[in-house]
Structures are given as structure tokens and as C-alpha cells.
Image: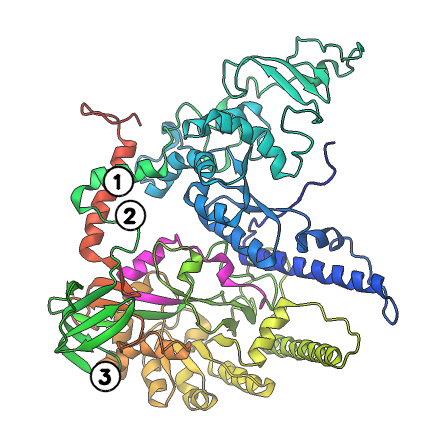
Amino acid sequence: MVSPALAQMASLSSGGGFGSYPGALMGRVAYFRQVLLDAAHYAAATAAYEADPSGWRRPEFDRTLAPLAAVASGEERILLPGSSTVEINRALRLGGELGLDFTIYGGQEGYRLAGELADAGVAVLVDVDWPEPLPERDRDPDADRPLREILHERLSPSTPAELAEAGVQFALSSGGSNSGEDFLAGVRRAIEGGLEPTRALQALTRDAAAVHGLDDRIGAVAAGMAADLVLADGYPWQESTRVEAMFIDGVRYAVSDDDEAGDDEDGESSEAGGGGAREAESAGVPDEARPHGRRGPAGRRGGSSQAPAPMRLAEVAERYAEVAGDGMVPMTGPYREDDVLAITGATILTMAGETIENGTVVVRDGRIARVGSGVRPPRGAHVIDADGGYLMPGIFDAHSHISTAGGVNEGSLAVTAMVRIEDVVDPTDVAIYRALAGGVTTVNILHGSANPIGGQNQVLKLRWGQDADGMRFEGAPPGIKFALGENPKRSRSFGPGPRRYPATRMGVLDVIREAFTEAAEYRDAWARHREAEAAGVRSRPPARDLELEALVEILEGERLVHAHSYRADEILQLLRLAEDLGFRIATLQHVLEGYRVADEIAAHGAGASTFSDWWAYKVEAYEAIPHNAALMADRGVLVSVNSDDAEEMRHLNHEAAKAVKWGGLSDDAALALVTINPARQFGIDDRVGSIEVGKDADLVIYDRHPLSSYAVVQTTLVDGKVYFDRELDRLRREQLAALERSLTEPAGEDGGEEP
């Protein structure tokens, strides 16, 4: 044994969201965060007792938290999972938030984040079990492969080279394979991807030891280091290399079944015998019979002869520029970034009380600088001619579940206020781009409705091409999801395992009341601790509880409640319960029978975010009516219309138009349902929701009035940057298709490459 303890290892593999906690990915992240906070509290309480035990009971030994105390304090390293860009960014964010000493394992999409990893000073264990295409015999001839998948297969083996050039410390890992042949094949492919052979050898020896803090003992041939040596006639990954001898702690071991162990330096025969010989490498097992997981049965896992030649990011960029020609459109957003731009020739629906014919909007540094009919574009500004179209604020979808990785429900517990959508935002979800094509610029991503008290929401700006942090709406008030009715009482028995409490509607309210009773007690415990400290009295702080902290924020008016609700009786019950407990409901989501209790909703001060015309799709929706939005608005309720659906969010302008048909709302009042009203409900109407000087330039151009069934989005801007344009999108599709053909089609007479 070289070392009895190198590092803790974390896994965030998702179990689906139901069953035991944690189930969904967001639950696993929350559990990880809470366990390390508990470990830090345990260590602090133990240290305080040992320093001065007078008046305190000894903390009870916890065999789970004790080993994690050093991790929580940053004194012991922990390995965090991160293979894709989303996962790597999550690991960087989580490790930084908790102040951990951490290494990322996986790292296969590190070629996209080499600079960020270098800036963070984080080491990476790169899994050389590279992805490969399925063999031709196993492919569906009618299925198109995503270009991102094709590119990843070509680019992932370049990760070690990219990390090396960026100055990131890394080592190479087998990814769990027991086959030395597969591992070395993966190393060969990394070298094909641009890694210098000497740097590959370093990653297999010195750097591998350094990542685990063992470079003072192993990893180099130097005086005082362990005599762990290999004598060979070439690099170990070369297929022609013959290993002549292997030494561990100076003792020679056999390197093949028919070699005999040599003598050690004292002349005594090694007792290792043939037992130290290299293991057989799956001899006689056909490639297709091996476990293949995500890679498909493509032969050796590290890199088969069928795998396409690796590429570097710079090569892909050059290839794209070549096939795109002079009119190249960026592969991902934004399409245009201009310090100053002007949109001219538009009918401007400001949502601020006026409509401007043949107007101009000037945008400077992402904000609206001027609005009017006589405004001239500044000199040097990029001009977008709306050509008689309509310009309106970007649409805000107040209820969405797009861009959520690893499950939208942490349904294992009745109260999951500690889980956070922000931990699982997937900025690569194509639904984001499709929403931009429908004029949506802001979305509220909510936890699902499996719990009376669910997880924390996240408001996003759809900055397609940014990472998760780059999409978060800065300054948006935090919120949380509640749910009433059939879903949280689990009448449909989600998932495996025993049914979870509550099983009735009255049980749902009981869970909410009990949770806030505990939260109030938690708040009082912290208040007593702070008072004691202020008075100079020795006091042990309560353990932080992330679930209760979120509920205390609600009691303090610092976190908005967004409650899934259908029936009028339950809506009234929740409003009265909230008032009894001392907080307010920010929005009632869906609120299908809101028309029956609109006066009570208005008196409470809650907003209502409803469907346009969904009804009778389940029992508790039978009394829904399409006049709901208009009737609530008439009674003074602040109303919005949401999608709760990745497809419907692409035509929320049409959903708003239904309020004109069914409820007789004016055009402006209908458009307010998807612009300024949801912005007000979420406390960000000072930034978005209307076209006014000083607000963010989140804008959408339609070719017709947006309430027309024939209206089509032409251009969508977020922060003054063009993230969707119909003509540029057409060109981009053609250019990406050309890039894909260049990567996948056989070489022709004019050159190219093999498939």
C-alpha cells in the first residue's frame, strides 16, 4: 500500500427523483452540500468541546461526519465528477462555493474549458475511455446523429493536449476499465489528439503521483524515490513495445506468463513468481461481447481502428470557416454583438402605455437608450430594419422546466426546500434556442410539483451559448415551488417504493404548516445564539439546515413562493395558511379555478400565472375555463399566461391572444400577460417587460402583429445582442450541415478524409 488514504470520492449519479433521498441530480447536489456543512459543524463542535468542555456535553461520535471533517475544512482532497462541460462547470462552482480542495475526474469535455480549469488551478483525472461511433452494423440508417455528438467524438481525445497547453495539471485514467490494453489504446488516441509523447509519459507517472500528493515518493526516477521502475524498448502505449523488466520497491516481477521472476539485489529469489505477471487482456472475448455502456460495442474502449481521427478545437473552427465562406455565421449565439445598434421602421408595442408607429429604438451597451418615432440612428450604429414589422419586449415564460438536468422532481421527500434548480441548469438544452425562435427571452425554471414544498427556482435569461452562470438573471429575487392537489398527495403513486406522506389534500396543508413551525423554531434558535454571543455568553451555534434556511427566508420576505394550484378550495386554504404563518404567496401557478376566488387572491396580493385554455385533462382540471385569465384580471389580480411546456413556450404570443378571443381583453392587456405582468410578478419589471429607456434590450421583432396567428418571429435580442435571426439561422443551418458532411462523408476526388 502506497498510502492508506488519498482522497474522498464523490458521485452525483442520478437515480431518477423518486424512492429514497436523494434521487434526482439536484437532490444529490443538495445532499452533498448539506453533508459537508454538517461535517464542518461537527468538527467545530468537537474542537470547541476539546478546548473547553465545561458546561457542554461531548458531541456524540459520528462515523459518517468524522472522516469528512478534513474535506469540509479543505485539508483533505475530494474527487468531484465532471466529464461534460455542464458537469465540469458544476464541479468548479460547487467546489469553489464550499472552499474544497478538489480534483475533477472524467474531464472528457475539458477541451472546451481548459482556460477555466487553469484559472481555477484545479487538477483533472482525464478518462481516456474515449467515446466512439457505433459500428455500421449497429446504426439506425434513418437516424441523424447530432453534430455535437460527432464533434465530441473527434474533439474529446484532444482534451489532454488542450489541458497541457493551458497549464492544467492532469493525469490519465482508465475510466474504470480493468483492461490495460484499452487504457493504453486510449493513451495512444490522446497522442493522436495532439498530446506530446513526453507529456503523456509525464501524465502517466510524475503528474499522476502529484495529483494525489505522492510525488515525494513515486512518479520519478530520482534518488530517494521508490524503486518502482519499468524497463522497456519503447513508450508503454506503443503496440510494438516490449517490456523487459518491472520492479516494485526494487523487487523484479515477471512481465509475462512464461517469464520467471529474477533475483532481488540481495540475491534472494522473489516470491512473487508468476503471480506478478501481466494479466491476460480479455483473450478470446469478442469485442462486441464486452460491456459497452455509453460508447457502443465499438471494439477497444480507449480507441479502436474504426474511430475517426481526432481534431483540435482550432481545427474545427478552421474547417467551419472554410465550409462557411465569407458569410460565416457563428456556430452558437450570439449572432451579433454591437455596442450601439438601432432598430428602425417598426411599430413599437412598448407595453408602457403607448404604441409608436414607424418608430426607432436605439440600444447602447445592452440597454435601451432612446425610443421614439423621430429618433435617428447614431452614426456608426448597426441598423436592423424591421421593415414594417412589430417590435415588442421579449416574452417572459413564468413557468417552465426546460434546461434541467437529472430530473425536475426530487420527489423522495414531502419537503425539499434545500434543492436548487440552479445546481442543474443545462445551458446546452436545444429548447433554449427554440424558445428564442419563439420570442422568449426570460424563463422561470421551476422544480416539479411532486412535493407540498419543492425546490428553489431559477430565473434565466436565454443567452444561448453562455454557461449556466452566464444565463442566470442577476438580481432576480429567489423563489421556491409549492404544490397543492393530486400531484403532491401522490395519488398516482410516482416511482418505486412505499407511498410517501401525504396521501390526502389535508395532509398537504399539514406538511406545509409543520415545515414552517420547524422553520420558526430554527430561526428562534439562531436568534438566541446571536443574542448570547452579543452578551458575551458562550454559546454553541445550531447546525445549519439548508431546508429550514430556505423556509426562514420565506418568513422573512426574502424568498418568493410560487404555488402549483388548481381548485378554488385549495387556493383559499393556502392563502389563509400563509397569512396565519406570516408570509405571502407571490404567484399561484396554473390556478385553474382562480376565477372563482379572484377577489380573495387580489386581497392577498398574489399574482396568478395560468394556462390559456387547458381544461379537463384530469379530474381536478374539469372546472377550468378559458375565460380564467380575463376574469381574474377584471377583479384586480395581476395575471400572466405560462406554458409549462417546451413546445408551447415557442408560441406564447398565440396563447396570450386567446385571452382576446375568450375574455375580450385589449391587445395590450393580452400582450401584458406574457411581458410586463410576469416581470412584475417576479420583481424584475425594472429590468424587463417593457420598452423603456434604461431597461435591458430584450426585444423581439415579428413580421405581423404578435397576436396574429400568422405572426412569425424574425429577430430576438437579449441584452442588445442578436441571439436569433431567421435569415442568419437559415445560413447557420446550411453551414453546419456542410461542416457535418465534411466530417462524415468519404473523401472525394478533391481530397478530404476517410469516414
How far, Cα to Cα, is label 1 from label 3? 48 Å
Instruction: Tell me where residue 270 appears, x and y as whole percent.
Output: 77, 14
Tell me if label 2 and label 1 are in contact, CB under 8 Å: yes
Instruction: Tell me where residue 139 appears, x and y as whole percent.
Output: 36, 33
Instruction: Tell me where residue 633 appears, x and y as whole percent.
Output: 34, 86
Q: Secondary structure at mark 2?
A: loop
On the image, numbered disc 2 is attached to which residue? Answer: 331
Q: Quick one: quadrant of the N terminus?
A: top right
Q: What's under tag 2, amino acid-wise?
A: Met
Marks 2 and 3, the one that precedes in the sequence: 2
Marks 1 and 3, the one that precedes in the sequence: 1
How far, Cα to Cα, is label 2 from label 3? 40 Å
Which numbered marker is on residue 320? 1
Q: Place residue 222 in its image quadrant.
A: top right
Which residue is nearer to you in this view: 239 or 303? 239
| For residue 574, above or below residue 294 | below
Marks 2 and 1, the one that precedes in the sequence: 1
Kindly tell me whether residue 578 is visible in this rendering.
yes
How far, Cα to Cα, is label 2 from label 1? 8 Å
Which residue is nearer to you in this view: 674 or 37? 37
Kindly tell me whether residue 592 is visible in this rendering.
no
Q: What's under tag 1, amino acid-wise?
A: Tyr
| For residue 301, above or below residue 75 | above
Residue lying at 35% horizontally and 60% vertically, measured from the top left = 463
Magenta-tinted stretch: 417-443
Using residue 160 as the reference point, say whether residue 679 is left or right of it: left
> Would you say residue 420 sits in the magenta stretch?
yes
On the image, numbered disc 3 is attached to which residue? Answer: 666
